[in-house]
Each structure stands twice: as structure tokens, then as C-alpha cells.
Amino acid sequence: MKKFLFTVLLIAGFSVNSQTTQNQFSLNFLVPSAEYEVSVSEKSTIDFNLGVGFAYTKSDFNGEHFGIFPGFETQYRYYYNLAKRADKGKKTSENSGNYIAGVASLSSGDPIFGDLEYANDYWGFVGPSWGLQRIYRSNFKLNLNLGAGLGFNDSGDTYFSGIIGIQLGFKLGKEK
């Protein structure tokens, strides 16, 4: 009986631990950025991402232009399927799960590199998104983020805008 009770408590302890969010730092290489995700509750985090974005245009009138632009993005993430993933025996540690998020981002209109310059000094985005994040045993990270919301710029223009984010990178540090 003692062994059975100990086993149940041990499994419950692992389940509780695996269903809570964690603080983590990662570097992304597909679109270079540094990211820090801070746990604010058992199933919620705030994610800060500082990096660059790529833009390309081609037209008969202006020709081809590209630019690499600095940007900052933050998200409030709520991981809604951690318990379901844990029940199926899937990894939930290191915030491996699906989430809904509120997103806010801001980017410069002046490129760090390239010849594509926008008339605006900055543009931004605010809106909801859905995402999934997986951290594998090698600390390889995959994050997909899809959403839609309100775009804006320093000229006072507002417009409907979509967001598609794909991050490939590595979480730094060891799993807790």
C-alpha cells in the first residue's frame, strides 16, 4: 500500500510540474532574434522578442528592393492544452503546447541592411493570435504563430493586417 501511495504521489508530482509554464531564453535563426518568455501563472507567459524582419518588393515601376528591419514584439500567451498533452504522454515542459495570445509588435521603417525604405518611420500591429510551440530534447525550438488584427503607422494610417510567424531556434539552458 505504501509503495502504491508513493507511486501515485510521484506521478501526480510529475504531472503538476509538467503542466506549468517556465521562464526560458532562446535564440532563433530562421528570422534572427533573441526571445525571453516569462511565466506569470501556471498556464500563462509573457514573451519578449527582439530581432529583425525581412521585406521584399518587386514591381515594374520601381524594380526589386529588399530590407532587413529591426523590430520588437511582445505576446501574452495562455497555454490551453497542457493537461490534455500530459494525459496523452506528450511533453509539456518548457512551454511545449498550444496557446492563444495577444500580440503587440513595432518595427522600424529604416532598414539595417538593404535598399527598401518606407515612407514611415515605424509601423506596428496589435491583435489576437493562435500558436503552437515545441521544445525538443536537443533544445531545438519550433514556434508557429498565426493571427489577424490592426496595423498602424506613424502617419496615422490604420488597416487590417495578418500575422504569420515561424521561429526555428534553440532554447538556451537545461530543462528543469
Image: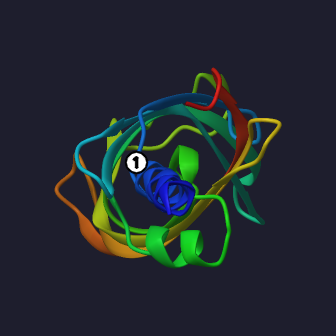
121 sits to left or right of 134: left
Q: Position of residue 161 (x, y in %)?
A: 40, 72
Question: Depth check: 27 or 171 in front?
Answer: 171
Secondary structure state at the residue bearing disc 1: loop
Residue at 75% from the left image edge and 34% from the top image edge: 29
Whether 162 is drawn above or below 25: the answer is: below
Residue 92 can be seen in this image: yes
36 sits to left or right of 154: right
Residue at 30% from the left image edge and 73% from the top image edge: 159
Whether 127 is drawn above or below 64: the answer is: below
Residue at 32% from the left image edge and 48% from the top image edge: 45
Question: Looking at the picture, which amino acid does disc 1 mark?
Answer: Thr
Question: Depth check: 110 or 131 in front?
Answer: 131
Q: Quadrant location of the C terminus?
A: top right
Question: Depth check: 133 or 164 in front?
Answer: 133
Residue 162 can be seen in this image: no
Task: Please identify the residue farthest to the front as the structure is shown.
Answer: 1
148 sits to left or right of 41: right
Numbered circles on residues, count? 1
Q: Position of residue 170 (x, y in %)?
A: 72, 33
Q: Position of residue 108 (x, y in %)?
A: 41, 34
Q: Residues within 10 Å of mark 1 (few under 14, many from 20)?
A: many
Q: Position of residue 145 (x, y in %)?
A: 54, 65
Which residue is labeled 1 in the image?
21
Residue at 47% from the left image edge and 43% from the top image edge: 118
86 sits to left or right of 27: left
